[in-house]
Amino acid sequence: MIKQKKASNLKDLNVIRKMISNHKKYDFMFAGLGTIVIASLTITLLVLFLDLVIDGYPKFNLDFLSNFPSRRAARAGILSAWVGSSLVLLVTFFVAVPLGVASGIYLEEYAKKNWFSDLIEINVSNLAGVPSIIYGLLALGLFVYSFGLGQSILTAGLTLALLMLPIVIVSTREAIRAIPVHIREAAYAVGATKWQVCHNHVIQYAYGGILTGIIIGMARAIGETAPVITIGALTFIAFLPPSPVGLEPPFINFDWLDAGFSVLPIQMFNWISRPQHAFHINAAATGAIIIILTLLMNGLAIKLRYNIRKKIKW
Amino acid sequence: MGSENNLIISSRLAKNYKRNLIERMIEFGLLCSGIVAIFITLAIIYVLVSEAIPFFQHVSMKDFLTDTVWTPNYSIKHYGILPLISGTLTTTGIALIVAVPLGTITAIYLSEFASHKVREVIKPILELLVGVPTVVFGYFALMLVTPMLQKIYPDLTTFNMLGPGIVMGIMIVPYIASVAEDSMRAVPMAIREGAYAMGATRFQTAIKVVTPAAISGIVAAYILAISRAVGETMIVAIAAGQQPNFTFNPVESAATITSYIVSVALGDLEHGGIGYQSIFAAGLTLLIMTLLINILGHMVRKKYAERY
């Protein structure tokens, strides 16, 4: 009798042991699966990058940067595209950054908790979820035709600024929210006004976080294609916009804002759409330039955020 | 003596007045910047609706929603949005089949299995993947993924929905992973410790304890992914062939709502013409779809949010 009980106990024990080892096996298997998934994502990113660099390698020379697009693939370059991209981003920067930072400060420091600030908040988070091509349609209807700005650098810059705005607002708010209240209280205690508190203390401490958001937003604006195509940017441009800086006073002119333009991703898209393989090499080279720029900018932003997190201890 | 005092006070009051005025002006300026977000939303709705109204005077709502042919550029014009919607849904579906398992596994792994050090390395890589421009992903789909698929399935045409769908899935994995991981990490440690104390493994804890607790965030991540995939433009415009085609078959070429807008915008656009208005009608459809998806996500998050 006793012997029998012992045997069944042993059997139970074995069942339990088996169960435990099974569960440990599943645990181990999932860890392996997770590693494989993440490794394959990393490899995908790497392949994506290397594919562009290897395919586009023959075009990595100065001629590619200093030639206009051409019907002959071998002579085609991206001069008008990179100049266009730079000027468009210049407009984007000067519109989106002040507006975004200001509305971030307003929402975080000034807005009272009421239906109105709720409304702004809902709008900001909704705008972040609107597909980028919708911004293109907005710009086509509003900027190009209603405001009569045409298919110009100004229109494209404003369009991308609208896209970038939610990113800047959200990152500004997050950066400001991380600053403890006692910093503000100390400033108020010595008689600072609200704006002095914001300007001399809050913005100073939030600077790094805001900058991170701006860099990420700009990186996104460089690669954004669909809205710029929608406003009707040209794909074949063999001239440069008027120079923003002149040799004679007043040294700066704004004629370039009205000029037609192309941007890097549109140039790339145009070359991909052609059947000849030679143009695909150009597309790859352009893509390599775009991806290097965006990876560098995103990398910088990540590094910056990491440094801030490490350095600041309230 | 008295008048001197008055002078000091009045000059300080004047300074105060100036100070207050500047303060109020700054506050007003900041308020104006804040209101811009509302203006943008209103402008989007206004532009899309006002340009789509003439379109719907020309094309009846019934044709728009039930006709299965979309040929605005042919001589016999049909304006049925269904082919564009079928293209959008098919590519989105493929993307989700790829992204949901991969994204969920990544999120569980990062939140429950990975050490702090591993996470510090992996998260930036995911963020870099988010930063890759979609036009580059489009090149990837057309030049690399589709040829690879053609080796497995030789009948596949150059333009198909499978390749871009898969690439779109890879693109949205980081979105799912980061949102789902955030919500899993928000589950209090004490709940995990309870499971561990009962002898559960990490896998059991992750599947039976943490995932149910974080389910609202995980589902919200899926919904965010849907809304990204529906609005994605360049990958499908490059690799799916821009030809409206009422089919759910992933090996056929098709146009999505977004790629139709791009293909029209690339051609000569006659302002005020029916082709011009049709892209606003398509855009309005897209906006309503993403809006409904986003509202759904918001509701899921509110309804199933776990309070600890």
Image (cartoon, coloured by chain):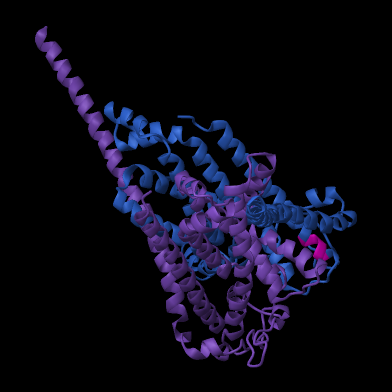
Chain colours: A purple, B blue
B276 inside magenta stretch: yes
Task: Examine the rendering and report whether any part of residue B252 can be seen.
Answer: no
A180 inside magenta stretch: no
* Horizontal relation, residue B298 to residue B193: left or right: right
| Percent x, y of residue A25 | 26, 39
**Could you say which is closer to the camera, residue B145 or residue A36?**
A36
| Percent x, y of residue B82 | 73, 52
* Horizontal relation, residue A63 to residue B196: left or right: right
- Predominant SS along the magenta part: helix
Look at 61% across and 76% down and name the residue there.
Answer: A263
- Determine the image quadrant of residue B23: bottom right
| Percent x, y of residue A311 | 35, 56
Specify the farthest residue to the left.
Answer: A3
* Horizontal relation, residue B239 to residue B215: left or right: right
| Percent x, y of residue A273 | 62, 75
Quadrant of the image containing the N terminus of chain A: top left
Look at 63% across and 39% down and name the residue there.
Answer: A113
Specify the farthest residue to the right.
Answer: B57
With respect to residue B53, does A144 lie above or below? below
**Could you say which is closer to the camera, residue B80 or residue A229?**
A229
**Residue stretch in magenta:** B275-279
With respect to residue A253, does B153 lie above or below? above
With respect to residue A233, does A245 lie above or below? below
Look at 67% across and 61% down and name the residue there.
Answer: A133
* Horizontal relation, residue B303 to residue B41: left or right: left
Look at 9% across and 11% down and name the residue there.
Answer: A3
Task: Examine the rendering and report whether any part of residue A7 can be seen.
Answer: yes
- Determine the image quadrant of residue A246: bottom right
**Could you say which is closer to the camera, residue A142 or residue B278?**
A142
